[in-house]
Image (cartoon, rainbow, N blue to C red):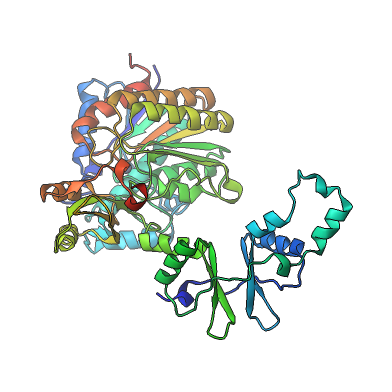
Amino acid sequence: MRRTGFLYDERFLLHDTGPEHPECSARLLAIYKGLEEAGLISKVRLIKASRADQAWIEIVHSIKLIMRFEEACLWGMNELDHPDNKMCRETFETAMLAVGGILHTVDLVMEGEIDNAFCAVRPPGHHAEVSKVMGFCYFNNVAIAARYLRRKWKLQRVGIVDFDVHHGNGTQNIFEDDPSVFYYSIHEHPSFSYPGTGRDFEKGTGEGYGFTLNSPVLPGWGDAEYKALLEKDLFPAFEEFKPEVILVSAGFDAHVDDDMSDIKLSTECFSWIMENIVGMADKYSGGRLISVLEGGYAVSRLSELARNHVEILLGSKA
Amino acid sequence: MFINKTMTRRVITIGPEAGILEARGKMEENGIRHLPVVDENNKVVGIITDRDLRSALPSVFSTCREDPKELQRISALKVGDVMNKKVTTISPMDTLEDALLLMHKSNKGALPVVDRDGNLKGIISTRDLVRAFINVLGIEEPGTLLCLVVEEKLGQMKKIVDAITEEGIPFGSILVARHWEKGKRAVFPYLLTVNVAKVKRKLENMGYTLLDPMEWSLDQTRKS
Ligand SMILES: [Zn+2]
């Protein structure tokens, strides 16, 4: 069995998005319950959040954005820039804790304390750009982790797999000209889903050309098409790139029971995807993999999805 | 929407006395397919397209390439010899709609924009229209497209717009497609939000049909 970290903190529940918002704290409670009921809490290394040093946020985001975000919270504003981004007084601190917790998790993996980890954080991050919050996202957790691996741990190649049903425009945008971070995303075709980017001709810019790869999926498609696209696009790309660490933007909103998209993945397909990503980490990255929660709004399904996810990380899934 | 707001002002042109090899070089260099031909007073006397050049120049596989006589003939060809003298032009104070309909009708990919005195002012091509269409769709801003099938009767749009506005969702654009099923319209609201599940349910509860994305089409006229 592998040594798997699980980043979870009750303070992640404090980010209150108000009534009827899909990105709600019940999501995390369902995830925790899923692990608890399967007896996994005692098998993982539980990691508590710690506040990020703002300097690490600044390796991705503009100081102006960080300050505007903090100020909006202090003023008690209930949204930032757009009605999608609902918030409360604790949102800024929660986002700081999420990033800090993830960077601490990265350290544990790089120091060899653990092999891999699942970070069940809120708010999510992959839509957030350098100076723009959007789509429920404030700080781009995964992008900060990728750059942290480059700066602090001096890695040459970081691979990101984003299987949230929405395209991670923020992550793509941040690394599009950077050949040291490979961004791969599979998502519902942008003509039918938010945010409208992630077309197959978006392949990076300048020196980063060829280090961004998108697999758009048509509405109504499911397991078979996902598997075929991952085999055709992601597997050979990572075989060639050979990432030293794999970061996963783990969004569960492509599930058939999730009404945020028209994609119909089964619970089993999420397991298949994760088994293959873990397999790639074993092959190329010495097993080093850090998975970070993005979307996933079918609360009734999150328990089983998170349980399977962590069992696969542990290597204990039958 | 007048043409002079959308047209490309910096036009690459050529004179009628220039050789066709020069015309080909200009097109390749600038990545364009149309060259208005102007006289010394900047008056349009013709237009030459990449298609005209292709029919005038033998292909690389052709044997006449080795024939020095044929080569000489080609190098001596002037733009004025192969250009189209009947030019479909448009005026700066015509509208974007005029251009769309005229390009559709005349099957032209570009129209020189010419003032009343025949002076070349610009050019409008499919490229300009593509840019305008991207802008009209609003797709450079993050959002989600829906498609509703509605009965063709007064007040439907208001209900849809009101229902979406009540949810606090901004619009990127809203398109209505005609020639759909008889007595029906397809309405495409482009919503600047990721949070569409709730508003989709609401619209369905109001009795609207959300069309399967695989069935969406702006152009039902073509199929029939
Ligand atoms: Zn998502």
Q: Position of residue A29 (x, y in %)?
A: 20, 35
Could one spot residue A114 in this view of the protein?
no
Location of residue B57 in the rendering, given as x and y in whole percent from the top left corner? 74, 55
Front-lying residue, B121 or A112: B121
Q: Is residue A285 visible?
A: yes
In the image, residue A70 above or below residue A165: below
Residue drawn at x 45%, y 69% as measured from the top left? B99
Which residue is the extreme one toward the bottom?
B117
Q: Nearer the viewer, residue B88 or A257?
A: B88
Query: Residue A170, relative to residue A313: is it above or below?
Result: below
Image region (quadrant) for ligand 1: top left
Give the image location of residue A19, x and y in percent.
14, 50
Q: Is residue B65 above or below residue B98?
A: above
Tell me which residue sits at (22%, 33%) in the image.
Answer: A257
**Image quadrant containing the C terminus of chain A:** top left
Residue lying farthest to the left in this orientation? B206
Q: Quadrant of the N terminus of chain A?
A: top left
Q: Is residue A64 left or right of residue A80?
A: right
**Left or right of A75, for residue B79:** right
On the image, the x and y values in percent for residue A182 come to 52, 39
Q: Residue at x 83, y 59 (%)?
A: B73
Query: Residue extending furthest top?
Result: A318
Q: In terms of depth relative to the viewer, which is nearer, B30 or A139?
A: B30
Count of marks placed on residues? 0
Q: Residue at x 63, y 67 (%)?
A: B84
Horizontal relation, residue B87 to residue B217: left or right: right
